[in-house]
Image (tube, grey):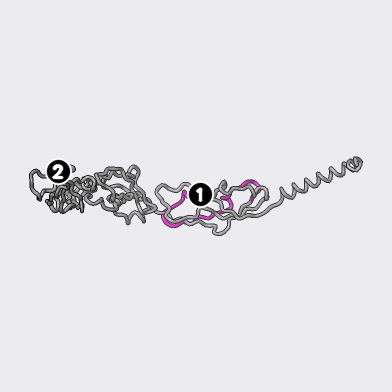
Amino acid sequence: MKDLFVKNMGLKLLSILFAISLWLFVNLKATEERDLQLPLRWEHLPSFLEITNPVNDFVRVRVAGPRRILSNLNPENFPVILDLTDAKAGIMDYQITEKMISLIPGLRGDVLPPDKVQFKFDLIVTKEVVVEPDIVGKPPAGYVLERVEVEPMRIEVVGAQSEIMGIDHAGTRVIDVSQLRETLVENVRIALDRPHVWPAEGQELVRIRLLVNEQEIGKWMRNMRVQVEDPAGPFTVQPAHVDVYLKGPAGEIHALGPEDVHLFVRFPEGEGKMYALPVLLRPLAEGVSTEIRPAKVVLKMLPQTP
């Protein structure tokens, strides 16, 4: 058995080496083609120009080369760079050529259609506009937004001439006042609805003051029970429940609930059987006035049970 293994050992080793060499040759020399999207980048755009049209951010390229290299190729590492130094206002086409493609040695790239990139260049201009805060909603009942103050009232905006000429004011981020119960002062960011227009440097924020005043409001509390203080015997009260109207500053009125309203009558002195007594109310918050309907109730004494 041993002789069988060692017999013709040199020939067997030579066969193994030949097989390995053939595998390496086939795999290292094997080529293929792949269609890739290489990132498109541009540089040296003149500072007085703005690109105002959508531009594809990739170039379609057919890449050929060894399979081993292609299988590990990351297109993001091989951008196509356009030099926009010569750009002028208007529409300009730029040709994409194979010379702009830089790949790993051993790979070849051919540009696939479309092989041109079109840019629309617009002059950058500056314009002064009024700031108009974007305010939505209304303060809660009993509060009113009396005044909106903006500082500064005017700012400069910068951008593409074709877009900036149609702008007469600058908005802000949305300010919701539906829960606002007191004056608010805060810095708010400018918001422009044009993609190629922006606030001038240092003018991205404005100071907004929303002056909110509290109003006087009223509300009814219905069917409130009347208590009798220190009763000296059995009795009935007619009516046993009354309505109360509260009027005062909105904050105070909103804060008052049925549990805060204590209605009562004082048990009378004397030997009478029936009394018309005024309904009293324990003091509420300062500035709150009240009206009780009916203002009096009838207290009737009942016979003592033996």
Element type at marker 1? strand
Residue 99 falls within the magenta-colored stretch: yes
Q: Residues within 10 Å of mark 1 (few under 14, many from 20)?
A: some
**Residue 253 is inside the magenta segment:** no
Q: Please name which of the two marks, 1 or 2, marks the residue nearer to the observer.
A: 2
Residue 94: horizontal and vertical position, in percent? Answer: 50, 55
Q: Earlier in the sequence, mark 1 or mark 2?
A: 1
Of 93 and 242, which appears nearest the observer?
Answer: 242
Residue 196 placement, left or right of 77: left
157 on left or right of 54: left
> Looking at the image, is 96 positioned above or below residue 150?
below
**Badge 2 element:** loop
Q: Please state which of residues 276 and 272 is positioned toward the viewer in this rendering.
A: 272
Q: Looking at the image, how many numbered discs can be counted on the residues? A: 2
Q: Few, some or many C-alpha atoms within 10 Å of disc 2 (few <14, some 14-19, many ≥20)?
A: few
Q: Residue at x 90, y 40 (%)?
A: 2
Whether residue 129 is visible to the viewer of this picture, yes or no, is no
Identify the residue position indicated by label 1 in the image.
Answer: 41
Task: Please report the residue visible at 65 percent of the width from the left and 53 percent of the height from the top.
Answer: 64
What amino acid is at disc 2?
A: Ala
Q: Outermost residue toward the front?
A: 306
User: Where residue 295 sits in the image (x, y, percent)?
Assistant: 12, 51
Q: Nearer the viewer, residue 269 or 107?
A: 269
Tell me the number on the disc at residue 303.
none
Instruction: Measuring from the top left, give residue 110's x and y in whole percent.
Output: 60, 55
Seen from the viewer's position, the closer of residues 243 and 172 is 243
- Residue occupied by mark 2: 232
Magenta-colored span:
82-107
